[in-house]
Amino acid sequence: MLAREVRLRWRACTLRLLVLCLAFVLCTHFMAELRRKSWPQDDLLPKVPPREPGIFIDGHNRRAEEVPSKRQVIYVRRSSRGGSSGRPAGNSYVPRRDVLKPVRWHIDLQPWAGPSHSLNEEATRFLKYISQPQIICSRLVTNGLTEKTEDSVKPWTVCLDSKFSLAYQIRNKQCRIYSLGLGEDDSIFEVNMASGGCEVHRFDPSIGSAHIHEGERLWHHRLSVDWRDPNPAIATHRLHSNTKKLGAILNEFGHWKIDILKADMESAEWKILENLILEGIVEQIGQLVVEIHLHWPGFEVSGNDSTVVRFWYSLFKELERKDFRLFYTYKDLSKPQMFLKKEAFNASSCYILSWVNTRWS
Ligand SMILES: *[C@@H]1O[C@H](CO)[C@@H](O)[C@H](O)[C@H]1NC(C)=O
Ligand SMILES: *[C@@H]1O[C@H](CO)[C@@H](O)[C@H](O)[C@H]1NC(C)=O
């Protein structure tokens, strides 16, 4: 009698276990399916015709009237898993940021250019450096994947030489671009790169809503990239700070790599670049396309003129040490020809420089 009861219990138990197993398997399968479907799949998405840049610049309100169905607002929320739910852009790269990266506190300053520590020596060395490409790129592409050029547009230039992986990434629609700006810039580069197959994230503090999905692969985020964490006093007042370090944004979006980082930060580029070097973020970047500003030292860059120029130069030497090579330099003759508030050294106040990370794969 007892034996029978035990046997029955045992059977019921096994059955329950089986049902549980089955449910688990089904559930896992369902989740996997769901996750796969939530990633953007190029062939499933509707094709959006390339944008007219002029319309785009005018701001999103006009745009909204013209293509209401293509606009949608996405709210990014942190999921508890740190996973991909609700994120803009598919996570074709698995986030695996190395938490134990050594923290550096300052960059290594290069020796002075000469014994007198004069501005003349420093400026000569620096200007020579930024006017000589260090590597030949056999396929320079300006302002996105179109051949057309417009005089009014800045020549944001990337390298699609087949010896670097970017060309391949674009062909496979696996490229991700971050564009840092302060709202005044045109967006021809971004629009063209997005229609060429790249996932483009534009960070611009002046847009209307937190996240805007503009077209198939172009996102706007109301965020501005800073070189330090927001002041805690301010952060407590404002729950959602619009200012973040690039490393924090990468973590939050679950992005590991940026194929191209474009930056036009109106003199904040020096401290941002320093931050990317100190935190090791720069190694996660394939190509750097930056407008640099020389008419004054830049935000929070201090010291006499020769110290400032030595700091600028040292930043670029840090990039070089990380195997970044300058492949494109452009002197903007349309801007004031000023160097640290002086008309000197035949320099412009504005240059566009492009580097390729030769370690990138
Ligand atoms: C600028 O400051 C540095 C360090 O403080 C000093 O070594 C250098 O001689 C100064 N240069 C000039 C031109 O005053
Ligand atoms: C000054 O710069 C312009 C433009 O880069 C160049 O064409 C010119 O030769 C330079 N002049 C001198 C004296 O170096």
Image (cartoon, rainbow, N blue to C red):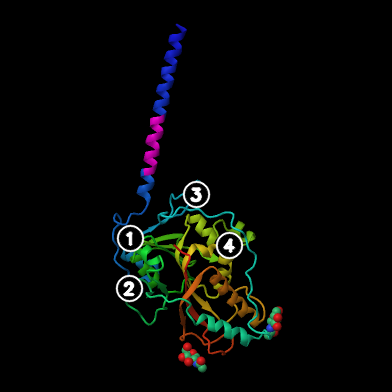
Q: Secondary structure at mark 2?
A: loop
* Residue 206 magenta-highlighted: no
Residue 340 in view: no
Q: Which amino acid, mark 4?
A: Glu
99 to 317, vertically: above or below = above
23 to 199, vertically: above or below = above
How far is the residue under mark 3 from the one under mark 2? 37 Å
Q: How far across and down, in percent of the image, does residue 259 sit?
A: 44, 64
Residue 131 in view: yes
> Of the residues under marks 3 and 2, which one precedes in the sequence?
3
How many C-alpha atoms fall within 10 Å of the one at disc 2: few (<14), some, or many (≥20)? few
291 to 347, vertically: above or below = above
How far is the residue under mark 2 from the one under mark 4? 34 Å
Q: Which amino acid, mark 1?
A: Lys
Q: Quadrant of ligand 1?
A: bottom right
How far is the residue under mark 1 from the one under mark 4? 37 Å
In the image, which disc is placed on residue 70?
Answer: 1
Residue at position x 59%, y 54% in the image? 100
Q: Which amino acid, mark 3?
A: Gly
Q: Which amino acid, mark 2?
A: Thr
The residue furthest top is 1
The residue that disc 4 covers is: 279
Chain part drawn in magenta: 21-32
Q: Secondary structure at mark 1?
A: helix
Q: How far across and down, in percent of the image, does residue 41 sit?
A: 33, 54
Q: Nearer the viewer, mark 2 or mark 1?
A: 2
Residue 359 versus residue 190: which sits nearer the camera? 359
The residue that disc 3 covers is: 82
Residue 347 versus residue 243: which sits nearer the camera? 347
Q: Quadrant of the N terminus?
A: top left
